[in-house]
Image (cartoon, rainbow, N blue to C red):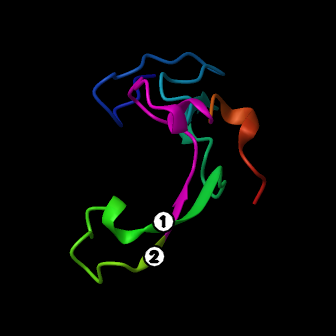
């Protein structure tokens, strides 16, 4: 099965996980493995986000899950190495 979610277009066989490690082929369908799972939660300064001009000096709640179709060298990305680190819902 071809995952059409991103530009990698992973060709997945049954049970295989895509490049992003957030999608897999299960029962002949591409399914999300990260749905409803939180791996990161933080209170960040709003200036760190694209909303930096919206209430400068305030905080914003950032919530994220695992899975990325890029391989960046940024440290915060490497802290979430795989599906095993996801917290149950």
What residue appears at the point 75 percent right and 60 percent down from the top-left corner? 89
When asked about the image quadrant of residue 50, the answer is bottom left
In the displayed structure, 82 sits above or below 55; it is above
What secondary structure is found at the residue carrying circle 1? Answer: strand
Residues under numbered marks 1 and 2 in contact, where contact means CB atoms less than 8 Å apart = yes
Mark 1 Cα shell of 10 Å, populated few (<14), some (14-19), many (≥20): few
Report which residue position mark 1 lands on: 44
Q: Residue furthest bottom?
A: 55
When asked about the image quadrant of residue 79, the answer is top right
What secondary structure is found at the residue carrying circle 2? Answer: strand
Q: Is residue 56 magenta?
A: no
Mark 2 Cα shell of 10 Å, populated few (<14), some (14-19), many (≥20): some
* Residue 12 image position (x, y, % from top left): 50, 18
Q: Is residue 77 magenta?
A: yes
Q: Is residue 57 left or right of residue 61?
A: left
Q: CA distance from mark 1 to mark 2?
A: 5 Å
Report which residue position mark 2 lands on: 59
What residue appears at the point 60 percent right and 53 percent down from the top-left corner? 35
Q: Is residue 17 visible?
A: yes
Residue 53: mark: none
Along the line of sight, which residue is nearer the eye, 75 or 33?
75
Q: Is residue 8 left or right of residue 42?
A: left
What residue appears at the point 75 percent right and 34 percent down from the top-left corner? 84
Q: What are the residue bounds of the magenta stretch?
A: 61-79
């Amino acid at each position: 099965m071809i995952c059409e979610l991103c530009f990698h277009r992973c060709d997945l066989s049954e049970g295989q996980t895509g490049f992003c490690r957030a999608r897999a082929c299960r029962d002949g369908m591409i399914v999300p493995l990260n749905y409803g799972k939180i791996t990161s939660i933080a209170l960040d300064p709003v200036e760190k986000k694209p909303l930096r001009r919206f209430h400068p000096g305030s905080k914003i709640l950032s919530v994220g899950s695992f899975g990325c179709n890029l391989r960046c060298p940024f440290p915060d990305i490497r802290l979430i190495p795989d599906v095993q680190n996801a917290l149950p819902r």
